[in-house]
Amino acid sequence: MEGPPLPPEARTPAQVWNLIEREFFLKRSLTLRAVEDRRKQQRGELKEEHLRKNPQARFYFDSHADAKLEIKLIDEQCHSSLASCRAIWKNQGRSEGRVFFDAVRDFCLFPLMAKGTSDLIGELESLEKNTNRPGLLSSSKAFFERELERLRSDWRTRLEIAVIESEHQRRRVVDAFKTQCFIESSKSAETTLTPLKQKRTPRAKPPCVAEAVKIIAKNPRITPTEFCKAIDGKAQSHPSQEKYKPPTRWEVKTFFDQYYKRPNTVSRFLTSARTLASQSNRQS
């Protein structure tokens, strides 16, 4: 889950670094001695190797090997420093982003590289002074500066990749949160009881339907015109009988009048009557 937003006092790299600086240097103080011991050990091994290959050498000044070793150690320290900063930031419950990685680059990694540069250049200059050979190690200085600039470029790329990955992670967290909210809202909507719609009261069938069922029972294949002729004939013979008259909602006097007005209405009426007739036959 994404951490809380940055406080108002941590909107810039400098402000972010203020939040992690104290704890970072406390942790780093515990590892500095181990780093220095490893540097001395590896330099001692380089010196022994150099003197083994050059028995006549009075001084150890394989400066290119020193430069490569220093670049390697600086890179290792950058990796461990970045891991420490990320752990501190995570323990504070915050999410990583561009401001965080810019703070680590500008206030942690690049100063560490600058200190390594000054230390090694100072040692090379001291070696030139002790051997009384000025300018002897100028090519080694240039080599080290080139390698260090390449290391800076690599770390800029690594941190930019980390920024992109953090943005992708934040987007995935937000999408997952939205999906979870949608699922929960859908479940709550399903569990909410909705009142059932009241069924409409069935409309009372007009008296002519029962008579139409009788006519169809006698002649199941009767056509609409034949039906109109049959029932209208009964209506003329029994003018007072409502069962021979068309439904009042049609607003006509005879079935033939409705047939000429809207023949499909009479066809639907006959279909309904045939359905009732078939149901009556099955029940009987």
Image (tube, rainbow, N blue to C red):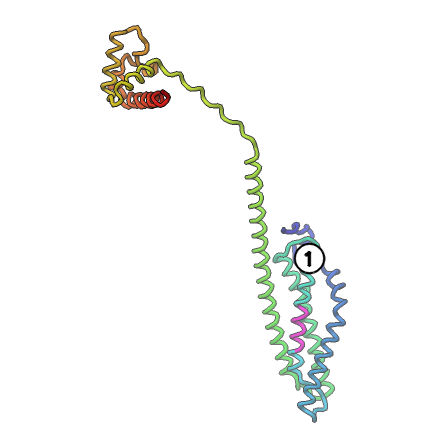
The x, y position of residue 37, in whole percent, is: 75, 75
Q: Please, which residue is most extreme toward the bottom here?
A: 56
Q: Is 160 placed left or right of 209 in the picture?
A: right
Q: Residue at x 65, y 71 (%)?
A: 75
Q: In the rendered view, would you say 66 is above or below 185?
A: below
Q: Please, which residue is most extreme toward the front here?
A: 284
The residue that mark 1 highlights is 89
Which image quadrant for residue 49? bottom right
Kind of residue at disc 1? Trp
Q: Name the element at disc 1.
A: helix
Please name the predominant secondary structure of the magenta segment in the image: helix
Q: Is 209 placed left or right of 62 in the picture?
A: left
Which image quadrant for residue 274? top left
Q: Is residue 75 magenta?
A: yes
- Report the span colored magenta: 69-78
Q: Quadrant of the C terminus?
A: top left
The one of 242 and 90 positioned closer to us in this rendering: 242
The one of 235 and 11 positioned closer to us in this rendering: 235
The one of 11 and 76 positioned closer to us in this rendering: 76
Q: Is residue 18 magenta?
A: no
Q: Is 32 placed left or right of 148 in the picture?
A: right
The one of 159 and 131 positioned closer to us in this rendering: 159
Which image quadrant for residue 117? bottom right
Q: Residue at x 72, y 61 (%)?
A: 21
The x, y position of residue 140, in whole percent, is: 64, 82
Q: Residue at x 25, y 7 (%)?
A: 237
